[in-house]
Image (cartoon, grey):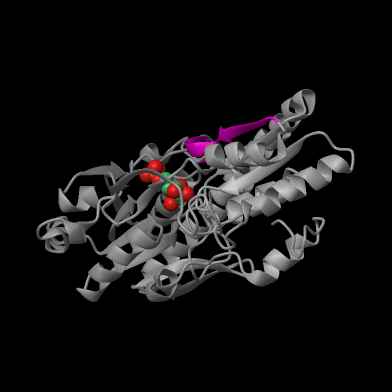
Amino acid sequence: MKIGMLTGGGDCPGLNAVIRAVVRKGIFTYEDEFIGFMEGWRGVIEDKSMPLNLDAVGGILPRGGTILRTSRTNPSKRPDGIDRCLSTLEKNQIDALIAIGGDDTLSVAQKLHERGAKVIGVPKTIDNDLGGTDYTFGFDTACNIVCEALDRVHTTAEAHNRVMVVEVMGRDAGWIALYSGIAGGADVILIPERPFDVDKVADSIRQRHERGRYFSIVVVAEGAKFSSEPGQGSPVLQDMGKDEFGHVKLGGIANILAREIEKRTKYETRAVVLGHIQRGGSPSAFDRVLATRYGLGAIDMVHRGEFGCMAALRSNKIVSIPLLEAISRNRTVDSEMIQIVDGLFQKVNDRETV
Ligand code: F6P
């Protein structure tokens, strides 16, 4: 078969491992031929591709980013975008397309599927919040990076008697904040799923310092929201711009929160924004294995004809689920998980501070 592949949306460590696994198994087992469309859906709209063979995927397993590059291009927002995608696939005689991406990329894959294209999805999001799958690759690497950062922030916070507020990725879901906060021994973890009262955060830090500790670490997801002033109920934005899928640019909550904590507690407080460091560099061993398993699963799905489906991880098995199931809802941190983690923290007033 002649198979096309693309990576769309924000990059994350492990994309190259998926590409490598698909190409190797496709060539060794099925004698497939591959081309890679460049820069997500932009490459399909504009018919820009590169040959993908064993040479092209040699040595890419430990590399971050994606050899196909990526973009947040949305064909539905471009004139005749979907039609142009379909004609590129036809022109290149593509028998099947593997789209590696998050809910945005996969929602385009679903549209093409509805128009008759043979598409398979592979789940990708650093935020780990795609529906239908237990874990996405890249998340583990991000948590390791944040955990290392928290260890480093701990020693400087301790040396200076400071509160450090560390902002991590997590637009709608607080998985990175939660997992890295647990692993890195954070004193307060703030996630988008539970708007927080800054007075209670300050109380909890004060309570800890009264217990004899003289520094604190707060981990806050970029999409977390204040339940009261300042900014009640709305996420903190870098600017008013939106991408082609309608997403705002989040960022800056750590600076506001640090200021508010210092105002209330009088403890010296600093903000650290980890940003894209969390998405860069080499994937962890866990993510290399997970990404490889997704790639091997996806190429098998192509040959079983499971189009309109996505490779998913369920109870440590790679299974095939409808794309629609994956894109219909985000997998956010549920209240049961929040309750479990709450057990780590001392109660402040009537509630915990996770
Ligand atoms: O969707 C994944 C993500 O990393 C979010 O956590 C973050 O808000 C966003 O992408 C950043 O996007 P960009 O790389 O386009 O700045």
For this rendering, which residue is in front, 50 or 68?
68
Which percent across, then down, holds residue 209? Answer: 83, 40
For this rendering, which residue is in front, 351 or 178?
351
For this rendering, which residue is in front, 307 or 102?
102
Dividing the picture into quadrants, the one containing residue 214 is top right
Dividing the picture into quadrants, the one containing residue 247 is bottom left
Left or right, 33 with reference to 201: left
Could you tell me if residue 292 is visible in this image? Answer: yes
Could you tell me if residue 10 is visible in this image? Answer: no
Q: How many labels does the image show?
A: 0
Question: Residue at 60% across / 41% down in the picture?
Answer: 260
Question: Residue at 58% across / 42% down in the picture?
Answer: 257
Can residue 269 be found in the magenta stretch?
yes
Dividing the picture into quadrants, the one containing residue 103 is bottom left
Left or right, 214 with reference to 166: right
Which percent across, then down, holds residue 83? Answer: 12, 63
Q: Quadrant of the N terminus?
A: bottom left
Question: Residue at 10% across / 57% down in the picture?
Answer: 79
Q: Quadrant of the C terminus?
A: bottom right
Left or right, 86 with reference to 351: left
Q: What stretch is highlighted in magenta?
A: 268-278
Return the residue found at the far right: 212
Left or right, 10 with reference to 233: left
Vertical position of residue 192 compared to residue 202: above or below: below
Question: Residue at 28% across / 63% down in the picture?
Answer: 108
Which percent across, then down, holds residue 134? Answer: 58, 65
Which percent across, then down, holds residue 224? Answer: 54, 53
Can residue 176 be found in the magenta stretch?
no
Vertical position of residue 160 compared to residue 114: above or below: above
